[in-house]
Amino acid sequence: MSAIFLVALGLGGFTLGYVFYSKFISERIFRLDPAFVTPAHAQEDGVDFVPTNRWVLWGHHFTSVAGAAPIVGPAIAVIWGWLPAFLWVVFGTIFFAGTHDAGALWASARNQGKSIGALTESVVGKRARALFMIVIFLLLLMVNAVFAIIIARLFVDFPSSVIPAWFVIAVALAIGWLLYRRGVPLLWPSVIALILLYASMFVGDAFPVALPGAIAGLDVPAQWVLLLFGYAAVASLLPVWVLLQPRDYINGLQLFIGLGIFFAAVLLASPEVVAPAYNQNLPADVPSFIPLLFVTIACGAISGFHGLVSSGTTSKQLDKETDVRFVGFLGAAGEGALALAAIIACTAGFASRLEWEGFYASFASGGLGAFVQGGGSIIAQGLRLPQHFGETLLAVMAVLFAATTMDTGVRLQRYIIQEWGSIYRIRFLTGRYLSTAIAVVTCLALAFGAGGGAGTGGLLIWPLFGTTNQLLAALTLLVLSVFLMKLGRRSIFTLIPFGFLIVMATLALLVQLRQFWEREQYFLVFLDLVILVATIFVVLESLGSLRKTWAERGADSGAGGAGGAGRP
């Protein structure tokens, strides 16, 4: 079967979902109001709260949520066959991710730009908020520590990606200055920046950069990890308009063009999907795809991390409430397109079924390597470019996605610590500098403490990322459901995705709990139980609030029907 068929179905589905379903949710459920004064205007401070052009904000949001996970997850999950992964990515993006991402953005904007964790207090209660924020902090710790080592390893494996990955910082600083200090219109800086970025890829391909050997006992990946966290600390402290917004915006354009190049190569090469639709010849170590598929592919279908970005940084930059649809739903569709590209690269980028089976000889044997190698092969066939350039293009895409997610992740971790300081009246935690230092130090402690000096400690708890991420998405949908019901609006469109996710993620957490126990990984057993218990209590608190709201609405309706005043 030609991969063109999957491209047409997938992109067609995302387009229809955005045109019709997102319009219905935006107008009938969220009821977006162009006259509503967003926190970016009401609380504008020039640092975190900054009204932003919706195209620039979309670029920030899309590249922040689309890290390495929507590549890695599908690249691993296709071992069960391309069909389960394809269906989950397409339907999960349309009916789950868009509503989740846009809903978290809208709810946060309606509540002074609070994160979804802090928002839980006003919607559900204090106990639910405290437990929810523990889950959020653990997830951010995983994301930041692991994405640093992912980028570091990409720099080592693909040294041609180093120059373009760092050059984008200089380009972003220039764009921020032109837009916000000189008032230059957006078009020409965008065009020139894109030209420079793609030129830097040719430079990087011609002059690969590799760090020297070990220094002070630190190997090369560990050195990159330290450099990346140093950069992330500085970036998280700068006003968003200086670096975060323009970097994410230009990355978003470049990465969308990169996806366009990839899909154009698929159309020209028309590669055959060599992987089976449903793999019945699984390696011995591969678990059942139910429930593991739905946590292996998190980003790219639905991801709790998206709700953190929506309610953490994006809501503070929202110019108009009606921009929620463009930024939230279209950002989710963009990540779905990236996951679709990963599925095609990892199922149609190999010469034969035998070669594909050799690459997927065990669970988790795919990943970024399969995406870069398979995608580079398709680009070489379709566009007649050298395969190593195609691999450089995709490696740079992966680095930029992961780096922008890490930038936002460290800033979000800083926000969480500052919110803790405000909630519990610990004044010294509310400062930007100390909260950033705590965020970075905790990530480095995990990376180097558990990693034995190699910077890989985040990989120790990474097996919990998928389940934690999906549980967070389920809890976000549940809190959003309570919020909608309190406003007297239909919550069925958030409750159905919540029900599906909470069942699949909880089952996956129990499966992993047994695996960790059998392998004597007792630290992971402890974390697994902490996450499970916190989730159960947040769900019980939220369902109690949901029942109470439902009963109050029923009492009001009864009073109105019995001749009382009722409510409009």
Image (tube, grey):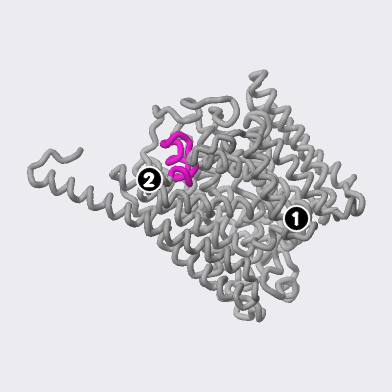
Residue numbers of the magenta segment: 103-119
The disc labelled 1 sits on which kind of residue? Phe
The disc labelled 2 sits on which kind of residue? Val
In whole angstroms, how far apart are the C-alphas of marks 1 and 2? 38 Å
**Number of other residues with Cα within 10 Å of mark 1, as a class: few under 14, some 14 to 19, many 20 or more:** some
| Residue 467 appears left or right of 143 | left
How many callouts does the rendering have?
A: 2
**Residue 123 tag number:** 2
Instruction: Tell me, yes or no, if residue 398 can be seen here.
Output: no
Q: Is residue 118 magenta?
A: yes
Q: x, y (%) of residue 221?
A: 81, 54
Q: Nearer the viewer, residue 427 or 519?
A: 427
Q: Is residue 317 magenta?
A: no
The residue lying at 28 percent from left, 44 percent from top is: 488
Secondary structure at badge 1 equals helix
Q: Which part of the image, by quadrant, shows the C terminus?
A: top left
Q: Which part of the image, by quadrant, shows the N terminus?
A: bottom right
Of all residues, the one furthest to the top in this rendering is 182
Q: x, y (%) of residue 504?
A: 48, 66
Q: Nearer the viewer, mark 1 or mark 2?
A: 1
| Residue 55 appears left or right of 203 | left
**Can you identify the residue that label 1 sits on?**
448
Q: Nearer the viewer, residue 107 or 62?
A: 107
The residue lying at 65 percent from left, 44 percent from top is: 439
Is the magenta region chiefly helix, strand or loop? Answer: helix
**Residue 530 tag number:** none
**Number of other residues with Cα within 10 Å of mark 2, as a class: few under 14, some 14 to 19, many 20 or more:** many
Q: x, y (%) of residue 477?
A: 43, 52
Of all residues, the one furthest to the left in this rendering is 563
Vertical arrangement, residue 541 with respect to residue 428, above or below: below
| Residue 101 appears left or right of 562 | right
